[in-house]
Image (cartoon, helix red, strand yellow):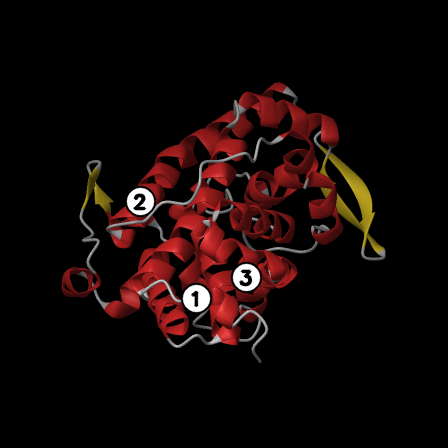
Amino acid sequence: MVLLSLLFFLPAGTFSWGFFAHRFINFHAVFLLPREMLAFYKSNIQYLSEHSVDPDKRRYILPEEAPRHYIDLDHFKQSDSLLLSSNWDKAIEQFSADTLRVHGIVPWWIQIVKANLTKAFAEKDRNAILKYSADIGHYIGDAHVPLHASSNHNGQLTNQLGIHGFWESRLPELFAAAQYDMLIDKAIYLKDPLAFIWGRIHQSAAAADTVLTIEKKLSDAMNGQYIFSYEKRNGKYERIYTVAYATRYHNALKGMVERRMRASTHAVASFWYTAWVDAGQPNLSEISHSK
């Protein structure tokens, strides 16, 4: 499985988890599905992997796309108390829809995509099932990234510019395929998908400070030496974090990236499964080869 995954997951530019990581997550989520879903999803695994990055590509052309990937949870806190309701209508009453969009709407957007996926299952619309399955995998993955739940999303407030891509792209590219244990429990039915994803977002927000603090201490200890190098990518040289520095940071995080990636993968499979169950568990073998 690891060897096969390496064929699909080539590093590329990124806004979120990283093109590699999103492909990796959607790919491995397929194998957590029940038998009734596995054949359909496995036969389309390359599509689900490759198109997991479509939402990031849409950010280039759709202004409304960006807020769907994050939520600045700390913006809505006062004395460690969260002022924001998890219910969209109530949240709009507390703040404005424009304010919510400025600071991110990922938990609510996931519910919209989940509803679209459920509808696609009910209508046995093969193309829509694949599209929304790939899309929801991306947004769920983003919800599991600590800095997607923080207004200090790229270390711009703490002089740590670049940490966003470092944590969620560089580290998975270096360590996921070779080191991460992706033997995960089977997908589960989510009785309350909104509450579930909010729980994961709170976990992400709680980890954001650790992501920043550990890197800051490590960088200060090295006095800025041996942190960056240059690597040729896509025909040009780019400044990247060195393998040695990435290894030290990865080790200092004590498995955080792996845990969040495993949690992302299980969540993606569980949302796929939940949408299928909510649609009445349609026979996917009837649409496996439909146009």
Q: As shown in the figure, which amino acid type bears the numbered disc 2?
A: Asp
Identity, as a three-letter code, of the amino acid under mark 3:
Phe
Q: Nearer the viewer, residue 73 or 129?
A: 129
Residue at mark 3: 40
Q: Which residue is mark 2?
A: 74
Rendered position, 225 above or below 34: above
What secondary structure is marked by label 2? Answer: helix
Residue at the outermost bottom position: 291
Residue at image point 36% right, 53% down = 71
Q: Which residue is mark 1?
A: 283
Image quadrant assignment for residue 93: bottom left
Q: Quadrant of residue 161?
A: top right
Q: Nearer the viewer, mark 2 or mark 3?
A: 3
Question: Where residue 41 sits in the image (x, y, percent)?
Answer: 55, 58
Q: Which residue corresponds to the image point at 51% horizontal and 66% vertical from the top-left?
A: 285
Spatial CA span between label 3 and label 1: 10 Å
Q: Report x, y in % for residue 1.
A: 67, 41
